[in-house]
Each structure stands twice: as C-alpha cells, then as structure tokens.
Amino acid sequence: RRDAKSRFLKNHPELMRALHTGLPKPFEIKEFVGSTMPFAAQIKAFAWADVVIAPHGAALGLCVYMRPGGAVVEIGYPKRELPLIFMATALSAQLEYFMTISKLGGHESGMVADVDDTVRMAKEAWTAVAKRAGFKKSSS
C-alpha cells in the first residue's frame, strides 16, 4: 500500500530492510503494488505467495486466491475493536493468520509498523507454512 493515501506504512523502507535481513534464507520477498498491475496479475501474485505481509486494506481480500496452507500477516492499526474481516477470509481459505498492530496510525492515515513484531510474526508465519508443507525450519 505504499502508493495509498491511507493505511500505508510510513516506515516501509525500514520494515523491508528488517524483513530482508531477519527472515530465513529460502524466504523470497517480492513487493506487491496492486495499483500497478492488472487484476489477473494481482490474483497470480497471491496464488504464488506462500506468505503475504500487508497493512489492513482491500488487497488482503486477494488471499482467497492463495493455496491452502499459506499464511497472512496483517498489519492492523490500534483501535478499540479490531477489523477482523481478513482473519475470517484467510481462515476460510485454509490459511494461517497472524496480526500485528502498528504503533501509530489508523484507517484514514498512514501507519507506523512495529518492525520487530512484524518480523517476528513473519517468522512464525514462515515456520507454520514450512511445517504444513513438511519442510524443516531453516536456521537464520
């Protein structure tokens, strides 16, 4: 959502650096900017993804096209009642679901991801996917 006016990550570069250095080596990170892609390409990107890490937003609905056994890490925003629509979507698609809450921001603004927690959740997601697929966890 780096091209969005709301729910984008103000610390996107920092988070990307942390994910690139903090995740196991077989974990390949590809950035997704849906507004630059035809809808069919968006579907294909999600269909090939094992783990999707994204801020709360409509594009997370594309997780229905992921293969069962994948995982979603949603970066939510602090509020009294969390919007859990994508949790239900992910679980109904037989995906693992994880949520981390941004440090700042909300539905109508940019967010500041909790980088350490997001990397931790991404590692948990990768471990869950690898375990379901029968792979041994890579050390890193």
Image (spheres, helix red, strand yellow):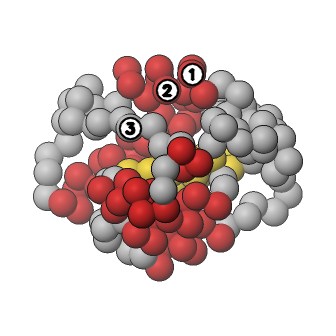
Secondary structure of the residue carrying tag 2 is helix
* 43 sits to left or right of 28: right
C-beta proximity under 8 Å, tags 2 and 1? yes
Q: CA distance from mark 2 to mark 1?
A: 5 Å
Front residue of 45/130: it is 45
Count neighbours of disc 2 (C-alpha within 10 A) and say few if under 14, some if 14 to 19, many if 20 or more: some
- What kind of element bears circle 3? loop
> Residue 100: x, y in percent?
61, 46
What residue is disc 1 on? 13
Q: Is residue 41 above or below residue 13?
A: below
Residue 118 in percent (x, y) is at 54, 37
The residue pinned by badge 2 equals 16
Residue sitting nearer the eye, 63 or 5: 5
Which residue in the protein does label 3 denote? 30
Q: Which mark is residue 122?
A: none
Q: Is residue 3 above or below residue 57?
A: above
* Residue at horizontal 78 percent and vertical 41 percent from the top: 5
Q: Amino acid at mark 2?
A: Met
Image side of residue 56 versus residue 44, left or right: right
Amino acid type of the residue that numbered disc 3 sits on in the rendered structure? Lys
Q: Which comes before the other along the chain, label 3 or label 2?
A: 2
**52 up-or-down from 31: above or below:** below
Asked whether, in this view, residue 30 is left or right of residue 10, the answer is left
Numbered label tally: 3
Q: Amino acid at mark 1?
A: Pro
Residue count near mark 1 (Cα–Cα under 10 Å), binned few <14, some 14–19, many ≥20: few
Q: CA distance from mark 3 to mark 1?
A: 13 Å
